[in-house]
Amino acid sequence: MPASPPTQRYNPGPPSDQSHSQYVHSPPPSQEEHTMLVSRTRANYMTHGVANGSIGGGYGPYSRASAPQTTTRFSNMSNASGFSEKVSQPTTPATPAPKLSPPKTNTVGYLWDAKDPDLDDALHNPDPVRDAILDRRWTLFSFRGWMNIGCLVVILVALITLFAGYPIALWYRTTHPTGPGYNLGGINGTGQIPVLNIPRLIDTDTPQDAYYRTGFDGESYTLVFSDEFNTNGRSFYPGDDPYWEAVNLHYWLTADLEWYQEDTVTTRDGNLVITLSEQPTHGLNFRSGMIQSWNKFCFTTGYIEVNMSLPGDPRVPGLWPAAWTMGNLARIGYGATTDGLWPFSYDSCDVGTFPNQTRKDGTPQAATGGLSYQPGQRLSACTCPGSDHPGPSVNKGRGAPEIDIIEAETNLATLRGSASQSLQLAPYNAGYQYIEADTYVYNSTGTNLNSYKGGTYQQAVSALTDIGITAYNRSGFQTYGFEYWSNPKNRGEGFVTWASGGKPTWTLTAAAIGPDPKTEINSRLISEEPM
Protein backbone atom coordinates (compact mmCIF):
# COMPACT_ATOMS: atom_id res chain seq x y z
CA MET A 1 0.00 0.00 0.00
CA PRO A 2 1.26 3.41 -0.79
CA ALA A 3 2.09 5.35 2.30
CA SER A 4 -0.44 7.94 3.28
CA PRO A 5 0.77 11.45 2.79
CA PRO A 6 2.09 13.10 5.89
CA THR A 7 -0.01 15.73 7.54
CA GLN A 8 0.94 18.87 9.38
CA ARG A 9 -0.20 19.80 12.90
CA TYR A 10 -0.05 23.35 14.16
CA ASN A 11 0.27 24.08 17.85
CA PRO A 12 -0.14 27.62 19.10
CA GLY A 13 3.00 28.87 20.71
CA PRO A 14 3.30 31.60 23.28
CA PRO A 15 2.20 35.02 22.08
CA SER A 16 4.81 37.52 21.04
CA ASP A 17 4.65 41.30 21.26
CA GLN A 18 3.63 41.33 17.56
CA SER A 19 0.65 39.10 18.49
CA HIS A 20 1.31 36.36 15.96
CA SER A 21 1.48 32.59 16.20
CA GLN A 22 4.42 30.27 15.64
CA TYR A 23 3.85 27.00 13.85
CA VAL A 24 5.88 23.81 13.76
CA HIS A 25 5.74 20.74 11.59
CA SER A 26 4.66 17.57 13.36
CA PRO A 27 3.12 14.19 12.55
CA PRO A 28 -0.64 13.78 12.58
CA PRO A 29 -2.22 13.18 16.03
CA SER A 30 -4.01 10.06 17.10
CA GLN A 31 -7.61 10.21 18.35
CA GLU A 32 -6.47 10.23 22.03
CA GLU A 33 -3.82 12.83 21.27
CA HIS A 34 -6.38 14.98 19.48
CA THR A 35 -8.68 14.94 22.54
CA MET A 36 -5.80 15.92 24.80
CA LEU A 37 -4.74 18.57 22.30
CA VAL A 38 -8.15 20.23 22.28
CA SER A 39 -8.36 20.19 26.08
CA ARG A 40 -4.86 21.58 26.45
CA THR A 41 -5.51 24.20 23.80
CA ARG A 42 -8.65 25.39 25.62
CA ALA A 43 -6.79 25.63 28.91
CA ASN A 44 -3.95 27.53 27.25
CA TYR A 45 -6.43 29.85 25.64
CA MET A 46 -8.15 30.69 28.95
CA THR A 47 -4.79 31.31 30.62
CA HIS A 48 -3.51 33.61 27.88
CA GLY A 49 -6.88 35.30 27.58
CA VAL A 50 -6.86 36.36 31.23
CA ALA A 51 -3.22 37.43 30.94
CA ASN A 52 -3.61 39.63 27.88
CA GLY A 53 -6.99 41.09 28.83
CA SER A 54 -9.25 39.44 26.29
CA ILE A 55 -10.98 37.83 29.29
CA GLY A 56 -11.51 40.07 32.30
CA GLY A 57 -12.57 43.37 30.82
CA GLY A 58 -9.25 44.35 29.17
CA TYR A 59 -7.23 44.59 32.38
CA GLY A 60 -4.86 41.64 31.89
CA PRO A 61 -1.20 42.19 32.83
CA TYR A 62 -0.02 41.87 29.17
CA SER A 63 -2.75 43.89 27.46
CA ARG A 64 -1.60 46.68 25.14
CA ALA A 65 -3.72 49.71 24.44
CA SER A 66 -1.85 50.34 21.13
CA ALA A 67 -2.17 46.79 19.86
CA PRO A 68 -4.55 45.98 17.00
CA GLN A 69 -8.13 45.72 18.27
CA THR A 70 -9.87 42.35 17.92
CA THR A 71 -13.10 41.19 19.39
CA THR A 72 -13.44 37.84 21.12
CA ARG A 73 -16.49 35.91 22.07
CA PHE A 74 -15.48 36.22 25.72
CA SER A 75 -15.45 39.99 25.97
CA ASN A 76 -17.33 42.95 24.64
CA MET A 77 -14.16 45.05 24.79
CA SER A 78 -11.37 45.28 22.22
CA ASN A 79 -8.11 43.59 23.02
CA ALA A 80 -4.59 43.79 21.70
CA SER A 81 -4.25 40.08 21.22
CA GLY A 82 -6.75 37.47 20.07
CA PHE A 83 -6.21 33.82 20.65
CA SER A 84 -8.28 31.03 19.23
CA GLU A 85 -7.78 27.39 18.70
CA LYS A 86 -5.93 26.55 15.54
CA VAL A 87 -7.27 23.82 13.29
CA SER A 88 -4.66 21.73 11.56
CA GLN A 89 -4.86 21.50 7.74
CA PRO A 90 -3.54 18.58 5.69
CA THR A 91 -0.60 19.45 3.47
CA THR A 92 1.59 17.67 0.98
CA PRO A 93 4.82 16.35 2.38
CA ALA A 94 7.97 18.24 1.68
CA THR A 95 11.51 18.04 2.90
CA PRO A 96 12.69 20.27 4.38
CA ALA A 97 9.52 21.72 5.90
CA PRO A 98 8.62 24.97 4.25
CA LYS A 99 7.80 28.09 6.22
CA LEU A 100 4.06 28.59 6.02
CA SER A 101 2.04 31.68 6.47
CA PRO A 102 -0.42 31.54 9.39
CA PRO A 103 -3.74 30.07 8.50
CA LYS A 104 -6.93 31.82 9.26
CA THR A 105 -8.13 31.25 12.83
CA ASN A 106 -11.45 29.68 13.45
CA THR A 107 -13.41 29.86 16.70
CA VAL A 108 -14.18 26.40 18.01
CA GLY A 109 -17.55 26.10 19.76
CA TYR A 110 -17.51 25.22 23.46
CA LEU A 111 -20.07 23.27 25.46
CA TRP A 112 -20.74 26.27 27.69
CA ASP A 113 -21.45 29.92 27.22
CA ALA A 114 -18.42 31.48 28.88
CA LYS A 115 -19.73 35.02 29.28
CA ASP A 116 -17.27 37.17 31.18
CA PRO A 117 -18.29 36.91 34.93
CA ASP A 118 -16.18 39.91 35.92
CA LEU A 119 -17.72 42.74 33.92
CA ASP A 120 -19.85 44.02 36.81
CA ASP A 121 -17.31 43.31 39.56
CA ALA A 122 -16.25 46.83 40.47
CA LEU A 123 -14.14 45.59 43.35
CA HIS A 124 -11.89 43.44 41.15
CA ASN A 125 -12.28 45.56 38.00
CA PRO A 126 -11.68 49.08 39.33
CA ASP A 127 -12.23 52.03 37.02
CA PRO A 128 -10.19 55.03 38.20
CA VAL A 129 -12.17 57.49 36.14
CA ARG A 130 -15.51 56.20 37.32
CA ASP A 131 -14.34 55.97 40.93
CA ALA A 132 -13.07 59.52 40.89
CA ILE A 133 -16.43 60.77 39.62
CA LEU A 134 -18.29 58.89 42.34
CA ASP A 135 -15.94 60.27 45.03
CA ARG A 136 -16.65 63.84 43.92
CA ARG A 137 -20.44 63.25 44.11
CA TRP A 138 -20.46 62.94 48.00
CA THR A 139 -22.73 65.42 49.72
CA LEU A 140 -23.81 65.99 53.31
CA PHE A 141 -27.43 66.32 52.22
CA SER A 142 -27.78 62.86 50.74
CA PHE A 143 -31.36 61.63 51.32
CA ARG A 144 -30.25 58.02 51.30
CA GLY A 145 -27.48 58.68 53.82
CA TRP A 146 -29.80 60.43 56.23
CA MET A 147 -32.30 57.59 55.91
CA ASN A 148 -29.57 55.13 56.88
CA ILE A 149 -28.51 57.22 59.88
CA GLY A 150 -32.13 57.66 60.95
CA CYS A 151 -32.70 53.91 60.85
CA LEU A 152 -29.64 53.30 63.03
CA VAL A 153 -30.83 55.91 65.53
CA VAL A 154 -34.27 54.27 65.76
CA ILE A 155 -32.68 50.86 66.42
CA LEU A 156 -30.36 52.33 69.07
CA VAL A 157 -33.23 54.09 70.86
CA ALA A 158 -35.32 50.89 70.79
CA LEU A 159 -32.49 48.88 72.36
CA ILE A 160 -31.91 51.44 75.11
CA THR A 161 -35.63 51.56 75.86
CA LEU A 162 -35.93 47.78 76.00
CA PHE A 163 -32.93 47.07 78.21
CA ALA A 164 -32.76 50.25 80.30
CA GLY A 165 -35.89 52.35 79.99
CA TYR A 166 -38.44 49.59 80.57
CA PRO A 167 -36.78 48.11 83.70
CA ILE A 168 -36.38 51.61 85.20
CA ALA A 169 -40.00 52.52 84.47
CA LEU A 170 -41.19 49.19 85.88
CA TRP A 171 -39.20 49.76 89.08
CA TYR A 172 -40.87 53.11 89.73
CA ARG A 173 -44.34 51.83 88.85
CA THR A 174 -44.09 48.80 91.20
CA THR A 175 -44.94 48.97 94.90
CA HIS A 176 -42.11 47.38 96.86
CA PRO A 177 -42.56 45.67 100.26
CA THR A 178 -41.15 47.55 103.21
CA GLY A 179 -40.58 44.45 105.36
CA PRO A 180 -37.21 42.85 106.04
CA GLY A 181 -37.51 40.38 103.17
CA TYR A 182 -38.40 40.70 99.48
CA ASN A 183 -37.78 39.21 96.05
CA LEU A 184 -38.14 35.58 94.95
CA GLY A 185 -37.56 33.27 97.89
CA GLY A 186 -37.12 36.19 100.27
CA ILE A 187 -34.00 38.38 100.50
CA ASN A 188 -33.13 40.04 103.77
CA GLY A 189 -32.89 43.80 104.24
CA THR A 190 -29.21 43.93 103.24
CA GLY A 191 -29.88 42.06 99.99
CA GLN A 192 -27.20 39.51 100.81
CA ILE A 193 -28.60 36.56 102.75
CA PRO A 194 -31.65 34.68 101.47
CA VAL A 195 -34.40 33.98 103.95
CA LEU A 196 -36.18 31.01 102.39
CA ASN A 197 -39.62 30.13 103.65
CA ILE A 198 -38.83 26.47 104.08
CA PRO A 199 -38.59 24.45 107.28
CA ARG A 200 -35.23 24.33 109.00
CA LEU A 201 -33.80 21.70 111.30
CA ILE A 202 -33.29 24.37 113.95
CA ASP A 203 -36.34 26.55 114.50
CA THR A 204 -35.56 30.24 114.01
CA ASP A 205 -37.48 30.97 117.23
CA THR A 206 -35.15 28.82 119.31
CA PRO A 207 -33.14 31.09 121.66
CA GLN A 208 -29.41 31.29 121.08
CA ASP A 209 -28.57 30.05 124.57
CA ALA A 210 -30.09 26.67 123.62
CA TYR A 211 -27.66 26.13 120.74
CA TYR A 212 -24.98 24.71 123.02
CA ARG A 213 -25.02 22.89 126.34
CA THR A 214 -22.68 21.02 128.62
CA GLY A 215 -23.97 17.51 129.17
CA PHE A 216 -24.43 15.66 132.42
CA ASP A 217 -21.35 13.70 131.36
CA GLY A 218 -19.29 16.90 131.08
CA GLU A 219 -19.17 16.79 127.28
CA SER A 220 -20.15 19.68 124.97
CA TYR A 221 -23.34 19.26 122.93
CA THR A 222 -24.45 21.24 119.85
CA LEU A 223 -28.09 21.70 118.88
CA VAL A 224 -29.06 19.93 115.64
CA PHE A 225 -32.88 20.05 115.74
CA SER A 226 -35.59 22.10 117.44
CA ASP A 227 -39.29 22.88 116.99
CA GLU A 228 -40.90 25.64 119.03
CA PHE A 229 -44.41 25.15 117.50
CA ASN A 230 -44.89 28.94 117.41
CA THR A 231 -46.76 28.98 114.09
CA ASN A 232 -50.49 28.69 114.76
CA GLY A 233 -52.71 26.22 112.94
CA ARG A 234 -50.10 23.78 111.68
CA SER A 235 -51.49 20.61 110.14
CA PHE A 236 -49.97 17.21 110.79
CA TYR A 237 -51.91 15.18 108.28
CA PRO A 238 -49.62 12.89 106.23
CA GLY A 239 -47.46 14.99 103.93
CA ASP A 240 -48.32 18.34 105.55
CA ASP A 241 -45.28 18.63 107.81
CA PRO A 242 -41.65 17.72 107.09
CA TYR A 243 -40.86 16.37 110.56
CA TRP A 244 -44.08 15.22 112.21
CA GLU A 245 -47.05 13.14 111.15
CA ALA A 246 -50.30 12.46 113.03
CA VAL A 247 -51.71 8.94 112.82
CA ASN A 248 -55.20 7.60 112.24
CA LEU A 249 -55.41 4.30 114.11
CA HIS A 250 -56.26 2.43 117.29
CA TYR A 251 -53.21 1.72 119.43
CA TRP A 252 -54.33 -1.78 120.29
CA LEU A 253 -50.95 -2.95 121.55
CA THR A 254 -51.64 -1.33 124.94
CA ALA A 255 -55.44 -1.73 124.75
CA ASP A 256 -56.03 2.04 124.58
CA LEU A 257 -59.60 3.26 124.94
CA GLU A 258 -59.22 6.11 122.43
CA TRP A 259 -58.90 6.38 118.66
CA TYR A 260 -55.99 8.47 117.41
CA GLN A 261 -57.04 10.92 114.68
CA GLU A 262 -55.18 13.65 112.76
CA ASP A 263 -57.54 16.55 113.47
CA THR A 264 -56.95 16.28 117.22
CA VAL A 265 -53.40 17.62 116.78
CA THR A 266 -52.58 21.25 115.90
CA THR A 267 -50.57 24.25 117.11
CA ARG A 268 -51.99 27.16 119.08
CA ASP A 269 -50.50 30.01 121.15
CA GLY A 270 -46.95 28.74 120.65
CA ASN A 271 -47.71 25.16 121.70
CA LEU A 272 -48.37 21.78 120.17
CA VAL A 273 -51.89 20.93 121.32
CA ILE A 274 -53.25 17.35 121.48
CA THR A 275 -56.93 17.21 122.43
CA LEU A 276 -58.57 14.27 124.22
CA SER A 277 -62.36 14.24 124.04
CA GLU A 278 -65.14 11.87 124.88
CA GLN A 279 -66.62 11.30 121.48
CA PRO A 280 -67.67 7.89 120.12
CA THR A 281 -65.68 6.90 117.07
CA HIS A 282 -64.67 3.58 115.47
CA GLY A 283 -66.39 1.66 118.27
CA LEU A 284 -64.45 3.50 120.99
CA ASN A 285 -65.62 6.21 123.36
CA PHE A 286 -62.70 8.67 123.11
CA ARG A 287 -60.64 10.52 120.52
CA SER A 288 -57.09 11.71 120.93
CA GLY A 289 -53.91 12.20 118.94
CA MET A 290 -50.38 10.96 118.38
CA ILE A 291 -47.62 12.45 116.22
CA GLN A 292 -44.51 10.60 115.07
CA SER A 293 -41.23 11.44 113.39
CA TRP A 294 -40.89 7.94 111.93
CA ASN A 295 -38.84 7.96 108.70
CA LYS A 296 -38.64 11.78 108.85
CA PHE A 297 -35.80 12.46 111.23
CA CYS A 298 -33.79 10.26 113.61
CA PHE A 299 -30.81 10.61 115.91
CA THR A 300 -28.18 8.34 117.43
CA THR A 301 -26.71 9.39 120.80
CA GLY A 302 -27.07 12.88 122.23
CA TYR A 303 -29.66 14.69 124.33
CA ILE A 304 -33.39 15.08 123.63
CA GLU A 305 -35.75 17.27 125.66
CA VAL A 306 -39.44 18.21 125.57
CA ASN A 307 -41.24 20.95 127.48
CA MET A 308 -44.70 19.71 128.43
CA SER A 309 -47.83 20.68 130.32
CA LEU A 310 -49.57 17.42 131.19
CA PRO A 311 -53.35 16.91 130.93
CA GLY A 312 -55.77 16.09 133.75
CA ASP A 313 -55.25 16.08 137.49
CA PRO A 314 -52.24 14.25 138.95
CA ARG A 315 -54.43 12.91 141.72
CA VAL A 316 -56.76 11.15 139.26
CA PRO A 317 -55.40 8.04 137.49
CA GLY A 318 -56.47 6.86 134.05
CA LEU A 319 -54.59 9.11 131.61
CA TRP A 320 -51.29 7.96 130.15
CA PRO A 321 -49.64 10.88 128.27
CA ALA A 322 -46.15 10.12 127.05
CA ALA A 323 -43.21 11.22 124.93
CA TRP A 324 -40.91 8.41 123.89
CA THR A 325 -38.49 7.16 121.25
CA MET A 326 -38.13 3.87 119.41
CA GLY A 327 -35.77 2.39 116.82
CA ASN A 328 -36.76 3.48 113.34
CA LEU A 329 -36.84 -0.07 111.92
CA ALA A 330 -40.31 -0.43 113.44
CA ARG A 331 -43.21 2.02 113.31
CA ILE A 332 -45.19 2.76 116.43
CA GLY A 333 -48.75 1.46 116.22
CA TYR A 334 -48.11 -0.88 113.29
CA GLY A 335 -47.89 -4.34 114.86
CA ALA A 336 -46.48 -6.11 111.80
CA THR A 337 -43.42 -3.84 111.94
CA THR A 338 -42.81 -4.24 115.67
CA ASP A 339 -43.25 -8.02 115.80
CA GLY A 340 -39.86 -9.56 116.48
CA LEU A 341 -38.13 -6.16 116.46
CA TRP A 342 -39.46 -4.33 119.53
CA PRO A 343 -37.83 -4.01 122.00
CA PHE A 344 -34.77 -6.03 120.90
CA SER A 345 -31.35 -4.45 121.38
CA TYR A 346 -29.16 -7.49 120.92
CA ASP A 347 -26.16 -8.45 118.80
CA SER A 348 -25.37 -12.03 119.81
CA CYS A 349 -26.24 -15.35 118.19
CA ASP A 350 -27.53 -17.52 121.03
CA VAL A 351 -30.72 -18.67 122.75
CA GLY A 352 -31.66 -15.04 123.41
CA THR A 353 -32.77 -14.80 119.77
CA PHE A 354 -35.05 -17.87 119.99
CA PRO A 355 -38.84 -17.74 120.44
CA ASN A 356 -39.63 -17.53 124.16
CA GLN A 357 -35.84 -17.51 124.76
CA THR A 358 -35.86 -21.34 124.95
CA ARG A 359 -34.62 -24.28 122.96
CA LYS A 360 -36.75 -27.21 121.85
CA ASP A 361 -35.80 -29.16 124.97
CA GLY A 362 -37.14 -26.35 127.18
CA THR A 363 -33.78 -25.07 128.34
CA PRO A 364 -32.64 -22.87 129.90
CA GLN A 365 -34.80 -23.49 132.90
CA ALA A 366 -34.81 -19.83 133.97
CA ALA A 367 -36.61 -18.90 130.75
CA THR A 368 -39.41 -21.43 131.08
CA GLY A 369 -42.76 -20.77 132.66
CA GLY A 370 -43.71 -17.80 130.54
CA LEU A 371 -40.74 -15.47 130.92
CA SER A 372 -41.07 -14.32 127.31
CA TYR A 373 -43.78 -14.50 124.68
CA GLN A 374 -41.55 -12.91 122.07
CA PRO A 375 -41.53 -14.70 118.68
CA GLY A 376 -37.74 -14.42 118.59
CA GLN A 377 -35.44 -11.72 117.20
CA ARG A 378 -36.42 -11.25 113.58
CA LEU A 379 -33.16 -9.56 112.51
CA SER A 380 -30.71 -11.47 114.65
CA ALA A 381 -26.98 -12.02 114.40
CA CYS A 382 -27.86 -15.60 113.41
CA THR A 383 -29.42 -14.55 110.08
CA CYS A 384 -28.36 -16.78 107.19
CA PRO A 385 -26.63 -15.26 104.15
CA GLY A 386 -29.15 -14.18 101.52
CA SER A 387 -31.99 -13.83 104.05
CA ASP A 388 -34.00 -10.67 104.60
CA HIS A 389 -31.85 -8.31 106.68
CA PRO A 390 -31.25 -4.53 106.57
CA GLY A 391 -27.48 -4.88 107.09
CA PRO A 392 -24.82 -3.75 107.34
CA SER A 393 -24.31 -7.55 107.42
CA VAL A 394 -26.45 -10.56 108.24
CA ASN A 395 -24.39 -11.27 111.36
CA LYS A 396 -25.31 -7.89 112.86
CA GLY A 397 -28.25 -8.04 115.26
CA ARG A 398 -30.82 -5.28 114.68
CA GLY A 399 -34.02 -4.27 116.47
CA ALA A 400 -36.24 -1.46 117.74
CA PRO A 401 -35.40 -0.68 121.37
CA GLU A 402 -37.45 1.88 123.28
CA ILE A 403 -36.23 4.76 125.47
CA ASP A 404 -39.00 6.73 127.17
CA ILE A 405 -38.60 10.46 127.79
CA ILE A 406 -41.64 10.38 130.06
CA GLU A 407 -44.71 8.27 130.67
CA ALA A 408 -46.90 10.20 133.09
CA GLU A 409 -48.81 8.24 135.71
CA THR A 410 -50.36 8.69 139.14
CA ASN A 411 -48.76 7.32 142.28
CA LEU A 412 -51.77 5.82 144.04
CA ALA A 413 -49.94 5.71 147.36
CA THR A 414 -49.25 9.44 147.43
CA LEU A 415 -51.81 10.67 144.83
CA ARG A 416 -49.05 12.59 143.12
CA GLY A 417 -48.00 12.63 139.52
CA SER A 418 -44.94 10.62 138.55
CA ALA A 419 -42.71 10.57 135.48
CA SER A 420 -41.74 7.05 134.51
CA GLN A 421 -38.43 7.24 132.59
CA SER A 422 -37.37 3.85 131.31
CA LEU A 423 -35.51 1.66 128.83
CA GLN A 424 -37.47 -1.22 127.26
CA LEU A 425 -35.37 -4.11 126.00
CA ALA A 426 -35.20 -7.78 124.98
CA PRO A 427 -34.15 -10.53 125.56
CA TYR A 428 -34.81 -10.63 129.27
CA ASN A 429 -32.95 -11.34 132.46
CA ALA A 430 -34.24 -14.11 134.70
CA GLY A 431 -37.16 -12.58 136.60
CA TYR A 432 -36.54 -9.35 134.62
CA GLN A 433 -33.95 -8.51 137.25
CA TYR A 434 -31.22 -6.21 135.96
CA ILE A 435 -28.16 -5.27 138.05
CA GLU A 436 -29.40 -2.34 140.15
CA ALA A 437 -25.95 -1.73 141.55
CA ASP A 438 -24.88 -0.46 138.13
CA THR A 439 -27.51 2.33 138.18
CA TYR A 440 -27.36 5.67 139.93
CA VAL A 441 -30.17 7.81 141.38
CA TYR A 442 -29.28 11.50 141.81
CA ASN A 443 -32.00 12.48 144.32
CA SER A 444 -33.49 9.60 146.26
CA THR A 445 -36.15 11.80 147.82
CA GLY A 446 -37.66 12.61 144.45
CA THR A 447 -36.66 9.60 142.34
CA ASN A 448 -36.95 5.88 143.02
CA LEU A 449 -36.31 2.80 140.92
CA ASN A 450 -39.56 1.40 139.63
CA SER A 451 -40.72 -1.86 141.17
CA TYR A 452 -42.24 -2.84 137.81
CA LYS A 453 -39.48 -4.54 135.81
CA GLY A 454 -41.33 -6.00 132.88
CA GLY A 455 -43.60 -8.72 131.55
CA THR A 456 -43.85 -11.32 128.83
CA TYR A 457 -43.48 -8.75 126.02
CA GLN A 458 -40.73 -6.50 127.37
CA GLN A 459 -38.24 -5.98 130.15
CA ALA A 460 -38.41 -2.49 131.67
CA VAL A 461 -35.53 -0.76 133.43
CA SER A 462 -37.26 2.23 134.97
CA ALA A 463 -37.33 4.91 137.65
CA LEU A 464 -40.16 7.17 138.90
CA THR A 465 -39.68 10.89 139.54
CA ASP A 466 -42.23 13.17 141.22
CA ILE A 467 -43.95 15.82 139.09
CA GLY A 468 -45.08 19.08 140.64
CA ILE A 469 -48.78 19.92 140.51
CA THR A 470 -48.04 23.11 138.56
CA ALA A 471 -46.93 21.10 135.51
CA TYR A 472 -50.54 20.25 134.55
CA ASN A 473 -53.36 21.78 132.53
CA ARG A 474 -51.29 24.64 131.05
CA SER A 475 -50.82 26.23 134.44
CA GLY A 476 -47.16 25.46 134.00
CA PHE A 477 -44.64 23.55 131.89
CA GLN A 478 -41.78 21.28 132.83
CA THR A 479 -38.92 19.82 130.79
CA TYR A 480 -38.16 16.10 130.52
CA GLY A 481 -35.35 14.46 128.61
CA PHE A 482 -32.56 11.95 128.41
CA GLU A 483 -28.92 11.94 127.38
CA TYR A 484 -27.38 8.77 126.06
CA TRP A 485 -24.20 7.41 124.56
CA SER A 486 -23.37 4.18 122.77
CA ASN A 487 -20.14 3.08 121.16
CA PRO A 488 -20.14 -0.07 118.98
CA LYS A 489 -16.36 -0.29 119.35
CA ASN A 490 -16.53 -0.15 123.14
CA ARG A 491 -20.02 -1.06 124.27
CA GLY A 492 -19.10 -0.91 127.93
CA GLU A 493 -19.08 2.91 127.65
CA GLY A 494 -22.82 3.10 126.99
CA PHE A 495 -25.20 4.85 129.35
CA VAL A 496 -28.56 6.63 129.56
CA THR A 497 -29.15 9.56 131.94
CA TRP A 498 -32.70 10.86 132.33
CA ALA A 499 -33.61 14.40 133.41
CA SER A 500 -36.62 16.28 134.76
CA GLY A 501 -36.77 20.05 135.13
CA GLY A 502 -33.30 20.33 133.61
CA LYS A 503 -31.71 18.18 136.34
CA PRO A 504 -30.54 14.56 136.06
CA THR A 505 -32.78 12.04 137.78
CA TRP A 506 -31.04 8.70 137.30
CA THR A 507 -28.46 6.90 135.13
CA LEU A 508 -28.41 3.40 133.67
CA THR A 509 -25.03 2.02 132.62
CA ALA A 510 -24.26 -0.71 130.10
CA ALA A 511 -23.14 -2.99 132.92
CA ALA A 512 -26.65 -3.02 134.44
CA ILE A 513 -27.94 -4.95 131.41
CA GLY A 514 -24.90 -7.18 130.94
CA PRO A 515 -24.81 -10.97 130.44
CA ASP A 516 -27.14 -13.22 132.42
CA PRO A 517 -25.86 -16.79 132.92
CA LYS A 518 -29.24 -17.95 134.19
CA THR A 519 -31.02 -17.30 130.90
CA GLU A 520 -27.77 -17.90 128.96
CA ILE A 521 -27.96 -14.54 127.18
CA ASN A 522 -25.26 -12.01 126.42
CA SER A 523 -25.26 -8.26 127.07
CA ARG A 524 -28.16 -6.16 125.83
CA LEU A 525 -27.01 -2.90 124.22
CA ILE A 526 -27.56 0.76 124.93
CA SER A 527 -29.30 1.54 121.66
CA GLU A 528 -27.15 1.80 118.56
CA GLU A 529 -30.21 2.15 116.34
CA PRO A 530 -31.46 5.40 114.77
CA MET A 531 -34.16 6.53 117.21
Image: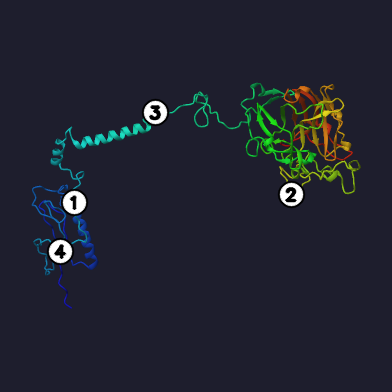
Q: CA distance from mark 4 to mark 2?
A: 101 Å
- N-terminal of the pair, mark 2 or mark 3, is 3
Work out whether residue 70 or residue 262 is closer to the camera in this orientation and state it.
Answer: 262
* Left or right: residue 187 compared with residue 450: left
Q: Nearer the viewer, mark 3 or mark 1?
A: 3
Residue 90 locus on image (x, y percent)? 13, 68
In the image, what residue type sits under mark 3? Answer: Ile
Q: Which residue is mark 3?
A: 168
Question: In what element is the residue under mark 1?
Answer: helix
Q: What's the residue type where badge 4 is placed?
A: Val
Q: Label 1: few (<14), some or many (≥20) within 10 Å?
A: some
Q: Which mark is residue 387?
A: 2
User: Residue 50: which disc?
Assistant: 1
Residue type at mark 2 is Ser
Task: State the mark number for residue 87.
Answer: 4
Q: Position of residue 268 (x, y in %)?
A: 65, 28
Q: Earlier in the sequence, mark 3 or mark 4?
A: 4
Q: Residue at x 80, y 37 (%)?
A: 425
